[in-house]
Image: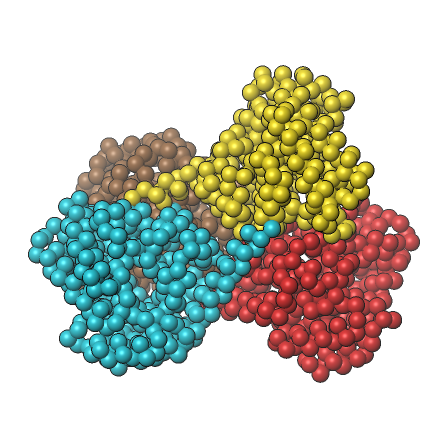
Chain colours: A brown, B cyan, C red, D yellow
Amino acid sequence: MGRLGIHSFVWTGGQTQDGLERALEKSAEHGYRTIEFAYLRPELFDLDRLAQKAQALDVEIGVTMGLPRDKDVSSTDPDAVKAGKQMLADAVHAVRDIGGNKLGGILYSAHTKYDRQPTPEGWKNSIDAIAETAEIAQAANVDLVLEVVNRFETNLLNTTAQGLKFIEDTGSDHVRLHLDTFHMNIEEANPAGAIRLAGDKLGYFHIGESNRGYLGDGTIPFDRVFDALLDIDYQRDIVFESFSTAVVDESLSLACAIWRDTWTDNDPLAAHAKEFIELKMAEAERRRATNSRP
Amino acid sequence: MGRLGIHSFVWTGGQTQDGLERALEKSAEHGYRTIEFAYLRPELFDLDRLAQKAQALDVEIGVTMGLPRDKDVSSTDPDAVKAGKQMLADAVHAVRDIGGNKLGGILYSAHTKYDRQPTPEGWKNSIDAIAETAEIAQAANVDLVLEVVNRFETNLLNTTAQGLKFIEDTGSDHVRLHLDTFHMNIEEANPAGAIRLAGDKLGYFHIGESNRGYLGDGTIPFDRVFDALLDIDYQRDIVFESFSTAVVDESLSLACAIWRDTWTDNDPLAAHAKEFIELKMAEAERRRATNSRP
Amino acid sequence: MGRLGIHSFVWTGGQTQDGLERALEKSAEHGYRTIEFAYLRPELFDLDRLAQKAQALDVEIGVTMGLPRDKDVSSTDPDAVKAGKQMLADAVHAVRDIGGNKLGGILYSAHTKYDRQPTPEGWKNSIDAIAETAEIAQAANVDLVLEVVNRFETNLLNTTAQGLKFIEDTGSDHVRLHLDTFHMNIEEANPAGAIRLAGDKLGYFHIGESNRGYLGDGTIPFDRVFDALLDIDYQRDIVFESFSTAVVDESLSLACAIWRDTWTDNDPLAAHAKEFIELKMAEAERRRATNSRP
Amino acid sequence: MGRLGIHSFVWTGGQTQDGLERALEKSAEHGYRTIEFAYLRPELFDLDRLAQKAQALDVEIGVTMGLPRDKDVSSTDPDAVKAGKQMLADAVHAVRDIGGNKLGGILYSAHTKYDRQPTPEGWKNSIDAIAETAEIAQAANVDLVLEVVNRFETNLLNTTAQGLKFIEDTGSDHVRLHLDTFHMNIEEANPAGAIRLAGDKLGYFHIGESNRGYLGDGTIPFDRVFDALLDIDYQRDIVFESFSTAVVDESLSLACAIWRDTWTDNDPLAAHAKEFIELKMAEAERRRATNSRP
């Protein structure tokens, strides 16, 4: 695998410059080599300073986001689509300015529990928006990855197969998928098979438990996940994600429906996740070696 | 186990008397001995006729529902709570009038993706409402079961442990839990353990796949589920639930976020579910016998 | 998959012509389209009559066997090796004469719990014997498949990777592997991965439970097995195997260490196995379709 | 759980005093608090010195063994039974003399691949022998635990249910079961269910992978194993066992059919096993807490 990272919301609600800087420090301290930030409004934060701190700590930055409903590029309202495209372009530039390497998340629709079915026109609007954004991202040297999420957080891309069709429709080589074990556990008939289906189109990977808490504290058979990542020779980043009401970005907490504390203390959570992922990855590598050694 | 049943939405969107009667017939034809209806407004349907048809076919009727937001008994708005209590009382009476044996579902809150955290006052209001409803249900000889659902469909009862605490707080012996494999797959750290934790408080059980489609077409380890149902000597009903856009109750489809067809033809779906559940139950019984035979 | 079959020892200890004919009839009656016989000594049975009966019933015949210790081609004793080669050649011809399509099993060593480590010289002797047998089999139009079994039944080929190396060393295109879920459960680090590793070299497949009893009455995650068979587009035969003391070939019972009855009545066992395998295969096909449909 | 231990054969073939002392040191160095020795012939080793070293290192000693065929207490040959009883009595005393706390393993039969079915008379002989040994052990303050093993290593006790019946037949309160994940993976219809069935009669527990190599390098679902150990509130010792040809006791290697190296370097194996078991146990405890917290 590539770098092992952690979502900044393990450390901070992300409201302050200090919070973000501390998140960078804590991530590095725990041995994570990449961090995921939510979209940072450039007017509120000193992006340069974050970029320098990340570089000094040798921690790469990725940014993820979901569009708000009034900037939904999968809408049939031209104003919303236009506003969404502008937000995506701004986000790409913010990633570039913070020295980040990727923009991911629910870029192709709102991050919301929809109350309407998706439409062919909305799909087309979204395709166009992502195709345009891909060109901007490529020029800015920022990777673009689309997160496939469960039905309660978008109505457009719930499965890997839908994501691959979407990418094909954009006609762009610069768009890849961002898969997440929490979402796959709800939507994919066979999560490991979905990873193999994605193959080289997998650009970013989230490790999260079925209840969004501690790894191992749920139902996801991670052995099969790591086996599949090895099957496709996945070399890009793997990032741990867990949410609790103990650390809150209120808007994300509501979008993700975080009503329970699965943890309150982030240090042992982060230490456990790193140990868990590294142990599981080592075990998967050993299984593959054992399986193939005569 | 008790009777094996099927949700009426496999057969019909539930808008017409004819649709419901046909659902009864199809269920019986496939060998199911109980059916689950969504709340039926008495003014729109001939409940007597449904009751007679069900009796003639030897199919029991259960009814499930979720409260609408303006009748949310977990609200802090007294008007909503009052309206919710009335709706629950009406529902109990409708179940009685249709000759049904139970009322279940999300009776303790709205069936919605909440955009606020639950509150202690709302919990108390909900406790009071369910305690009152339990008395009415007991008098009407209708079982009352509370469905524990995933975070995107309520903010109040997402786990079995929360459900058990809720029941304890009502002080009523007449309230039991309604568990569902689809929801448990998202929320429980150990679904089989949760079933054992519920024990005799388990009053109703939904079998649904992780993607709400065909059984086996997802990630749920059903062997462990059936082992656990035997561990607690579960003798009440088991009902199969699957949703597709092919058969639509629009409001439930939106509440449950059904954007994809996992099937279009309901006959083979129903036939497969029955074969699957009966085979799995027989295997679990054989495992238990094999395990305990010297 | 190709034909679905059943081992004759579900029906008969295999000591009499009548027993074998009845096994053919019972297999056909249950809808199995292939049967597996243990090696039949041509002097004791009317092979022609078996061939005609099989053809009339449209049931194909495969034959499996394990070498006895005094005919062990992996021995360093030239006499044993020579006797083993002769037995293999005779077996190929018996398969041809009975109208069978394949010879499988532990053809490369004795079927025994060894009390010595394998040796490089024994490996070479076995390679030579199988290479010679492959030529005879090819000329006789009989497929040759080597069963990879657990450590207690041979010391030579316990894993798929060892089997593939062995085939490579024979230099023959006519030799394939015969894998078995019972054995893989003990030996393979990742059984599904081993099936994918075998790929087109998989020539025959045994479905057996971890305790050699009813399918589902053990620990094998069959969903992953069927997913893997689809991953490699396996089109050859799948045969169900289960042993009990209720039906006995004494020598096989001892070699396989069958001390317990996991069943006594073979009809429901055979009916269940067919339903189980067909349901699982259909579910795996549905999972693959669901996973890949946008 | 009680103490976490390791089998001495990870460190040494057990032929020399030096080897055993080094095994004690390595176990302690890795943080294991108990060690398992194979039966030590008192005339060949300085048991006092081992006892003192173990005490100094705060490492407890358990001893396991399997009877040889000529001392098989499940035999119908009175001489063999008599010799077996003597060997068991000697072993109890050796455990006492080495300062050990338990005698386990295949004490009730030979440790061999049998070539005959078990007999009622042999069962009775074995019951008598273990009942007598239990009295000796109780007087010597040594726990007595019977290892339930797979069909290829005994023909008498292959399942927990058989073991419980055996204990019942002895009429002794001093005999408990010694279960092992490697063996359960082959024999139990539901290993976690078998642990729950054993309950307080579980006296000793072996953690071993399905291929006897690194934990995680096989098919055993350890999460369910640890959940079950918590379900029965298991507080006795857990010992890791793995065999490779790299460290050899020849007789055990042959009895256990160790033909392949699943590892060659014991230090990383032991370190990994400890990390794996402690992580899994912590995760199981967290699952239980999460499951039961409202």
Q: How many labels does the image show?
A: 0
For residue B56, side relative to residue D156 (left or right): left
Which residue is at the front of the view, D284 or B134?
Answer: B134
Q: Which residue lies furthest to the right in this view?
A: C79
Relative to A256, is D94 on the left or the right?
right
Residue at 62% across, 33% down: D144
Outermost residue toward the front in this view? D171
Up the image or down, D100 lies above or below A55; here it is above
Residue at x 71%, y 49% (from the top left corner): D120
Query: Which residue occupies the extreme left position in the image?
Result: B79
The answer to whether residue C151 of the structure is visible from this angle is no
> Based on the displayed image, in which of its 4 quarters is residue A122 positioned?
bottom left
| Quadrant where the N terminus of chain C is found in the figure | bottom right
A272 and A108: which is toward the camera: A272
Q: Residue B290, percent across and down? A: 57, 55
Considering only vertical position in the picture, is D19 above or below C69?
above
Q: In this view, does B185 lie to the left or right of A279?
A: left
Which residue is found at the position 77% from the left and 78% from the top?
Answer: C51
Query: Does the image show residue B123?
Result: yes
Q: Which quadrant is the C terminus of chain C positioned in?
A: bottom left
Foreground: B100 or B278?
B100
